[in-house]
Image (cartoon, rainbow, N blue to C red):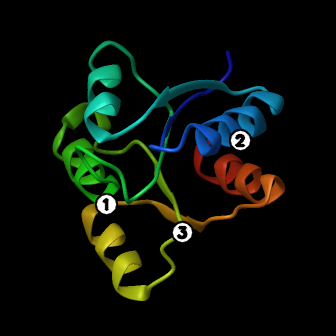
Amino acid sequence: MSKKILAVDDSKTMRDMVSFTLKGAGYDVLEAADGLLALDALVSQSVDLVITDINMPNMDGISLVKALRENPSFSSTPILVLTTESDDSKKNEGRDAGATGWIVKPFEPEKLLKVVQKVCG
């Protein structure tokens, strides 16, 4: 059975790029446009990995990471942050919230897949 990944980004273009890359490698991909929609999607489904942007409306990526880490069902689910933010203070904030890893946009598909395989098996 293929691994299921939730891609969270307010940019449809970015979600499409992430989804295309991951589906091409055989992963199942769910998409959400912000953190609140991601939490809604996760009420009825479990995933093997969450990939989230930081800067989004309604609920940002850091808040999403914190909310997932507070939920016992997702306390050990890998969470990758995929963002244009490369500032160390933002990275530390993400790590403190419980993010597993950090990828800076624009991303190289091969690098994304390598990181996903590493954290997701």
The residues bearing labels 1 and 2 have C-alpha atoms spaced at a distance of: 25 Å
The residues bearing labels 3 and 2 have C-alpha atoms spaced at a distance of: 15 Å
* Residue 81 appears anywhere in the view: yes
Q: Name the residue under label 2.
A: 17
- Please name the residue shown 29% across and 53% down the image: 60
Along the polypeptide, which appears first: circle 3 or circle 2? 2
Of the 4 image quadrants, the one containing the N terminus is: top right
Q: Mark 3 points at which residue?
A: 84
- In this rendering, the answer to whether 30 lies above or below 89 is above
- In this rendering, the answer to whether 84 lies above or below 43 is below
Q: Which element is circle 2 on?
A: helix
- Please name the residue shown 37% across and 59% down the image: 55
User: Label for residue 114?
Assistant: none
Q: Position of residue 49 (x, y in %)?
A: 50, 39
Q: What residue type is labelled 2?
A: Met
Q: Where is residue 33 in the image (x, y as percent from the top left)?
A: 42, 35
Q: Which amino acid does label 3 sit on?
A: Thr
Q: 36 left or right of 12?
A: left
User: Label for residue 98?
Assistant: 1
Along the polypeptide, which appears first: circle 3 or circle 1? 3
Q: 81 left or right of 42?
A: right
Q: Where is residue 36 in the image (x, y as percent from the top left)?
A: 25, 34
- Is the residue marked by circle 3 packed among few (<14), some (14-19), or many (20+) residues within 10 Å? some
